[in-house]
Image (cartoon, rainbow, N blue to C red):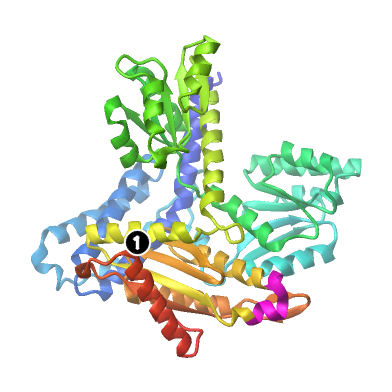
Amino acid sequence: MAPPKNEQFFQEQLAKKRWEFWCSLPERLLDLSNEVSRLLEEDDRRDRLQNIYMLLHRMVGSAGTLGQLPLSDEARQFEQKVKALLNDGKTLQHANLDWLKPMSSRLSAVIVEPDGKRVDVVAARVPVEGQKSLIGVLESAPSEFASLERQLSPFNYRLQHFEHPLSAVSAGTVEGPQLVLINLSSFYDDACQRQALEAFCQRLEEQRIQVLFLAEEDRFDFRVFAAKKMAVGLFVKPLSVPKLTARIDQALARLSAPPERVMVVDDDDALAEHYKLVLEGAGMTVKVLRQADRIMDELTQFRPELVLMDLHMPEYSGTDLAAVIRQYDQWESLPIVYLSSETDMAEQIRAMRFGADDFLCKPVLDAQLVAAVHARIERARRLADQITKDSLTGLLRHASIKEHVAQEASRAMRDGQPLSVAMIDIDFFKSVNDTYGHPGGDLVISSLATLLKQRVRASDIVGRYGGEEFVVVLPNCDRQFAETILDNIRKLFARIDFDSAGKTFHCTFSAGIGVLDPSLGEKEEDLIAAADAALYRAKNSGRDRVM
C-alpha cells in the first residue's frame, strides 16, 4: 500500500534535506581543515580550538540526524578529545596537536551518499585550484558551441557539449552539471527534434538540473516553451556575455541559498506547530511567536523573510501587528501573509489595507502553504537582489558592502575575533576600456567578480565598491590568512585569457588589506581607509600584488 500523501511528502522533503546536507559537507570539512591549519600556526590556541570544537559539535548533531551516522560517530570522537583539551588549559599551549591534521580526511572517509554509496566527498566535490563549474550545452552546431565555450571560459566554466537531445538522453545527461544551456532554435521547429527536446527537458527536471534557453530570434512561442519548462531564462543572440553569466551565477547560487526564514504568529499552538512542521519539512527555518507584544524584538533577533499571521487573535489582531510592523522602515518590505478562517471578502480586503501582501483561507493544504511561502520569499529575495546588488556583477553595491563592513566590525569587536577587509582594484583598467571598449571592460569586471565569488570562503562577503574597485570582507580572518586567500585569487586572475574582438589579453589586480584592531575601537571607515591606503602602496610598488 502506498504511504499517505502527507507522509510521502515528508519523506521526500527529508530526502531533500539529507541530500542538501551531503552537498554541504565539502565546505564544512574545508572549514575544519582551514581552522586546523590556522591553529597550528598560532601561539594563542584557545579561541581557534573553540571554533574547531563548535564545528565538530554541530557536525555530530547534524550528521546523526541527516543520515550520516558513521560521520557523526567519527566526529564525536574528535569532539570529545578537543573538549578534554579545552578543559585542561594547563597543557593546551604546549600540547602536540598534529593529530588534528588528518581529521578532515578521516571524516571524509566515512561519509556515504544519500543512497548509501561510500564516496570520498572531499576528493569528489571540493573545488581545487583551476577546477571550473561544469555547464552542459545542447547545441547542434559545433562552431556555435566553440564560440560559446570561448566566451564563457574566462568565467571559470567548463562546458560539456551535446549535439542532439537523443544523444544527451541516451548518455543519461551527466551527473555533474547543475545547469544546461539549450539553443532552442536548433531543435524547436522540427517535430521529431522537438519531441526529443521534450524528453531531454523531462530528464533534466527529474534530475533537478536547471535549464537556460538560448535563441537566434525573440519569438513568443519560444518564451512560452521556456516558461513551461521552468527555465531560469531565455537569452537572444547576439549574447550579452556578462548578463548571461550573471544569470547563470544567480541560478547556481539559488541551489546553495540559505533556508527560507519564516515567523508564525497564531494563538492556536497546535496549528502553529503544524505549520512549523510542514515548513521545516520543506527545508525552511521556522520560529513560532508565542508573545505577540514581543514581535519587534523577535523580528530583530530572528530576521524572518516572511511572517505568517492569524487574523483574529484574542489580545492583538493580525491587522494590529501588521500595522505596527509597517511603522518601522527596515520592515517595510517584509512579506506578511494572513492565515485565517475569515471568509468575508470585505473583511479580507479591509485586513489587506493594514500592510499585508496575501491572504490564505484556513484550512490550507500543506502543499499550498509551502508553495505560497516559497514563491513569496523567492520574489522578495529577487527584489532585494535588484535593490542591493550590482546588475553587472551580481555583487553587493557600494552602500550595501559598507553596511556589511560595519556589521562585521561590530561583531568582531564584540566577539574579540579578527577581521580583515580587502580593497581590490584592476590594474590599468582605463587602458582596457580604451583598447577593447566597454564590452571588454565589462568582461574583465564580471570575470573578477565571478572569481571572487567562487574563491572566497562561504562566510566572506564581496561587493563592488565602484567602477573597477571591489571590497572583500573576511570575518574571523587575520592578515596572514587574508593575504593567502587574495594572493591565490590574484594568481588565478592573471592566468585568465580574455577575448575581445578576436584579440586575447590578460589583466592583473592590486589589493590592500586593512585589519581590525579591537583595542582602538575602529569603525568601518577606519577599516576601509586602511585597506585603501594599503592598496595605494601596492600600486606604487609595481601593481599585481597584495599588501
Amino acid type, callout 1 = Leu
Magenta segment includes 433: yes
In this picture, is 211 found above or below 276?
below
Residue 472 is situated, as x and y percent measured from the top left of the image, at 44, 66
Report the residue that reaches farthest toward the right.
190
Instruction: Give the overall secondary structure of the magenta segment.
Output: helix
Pointer 1: what residue?
32
Residue 451 is situated, as x and y percent measured from the top left of the image, at 55, 67
Of 137 and 476, nearer the camera is 476
Residue pictured at 55% horizontal, 66% vertical: 449
Which quarter of the figure has residue 41? bottom left
In this picture, is 478 found above or below 140?
below
Residue 359 is situated, as x and y percent measured from the top left of the image, at 51, 21
Residue pictured at 37% horizontal, 41% vertical: 303
Residue pictured at 48% horizontal, 11% vertical: 342
Left or right of 260: which side holds 33? left
Magenta segment includes 360: no
Regarding residue 29, the answer to whether it shows in the image is: no
Magenta residue span: 431-440
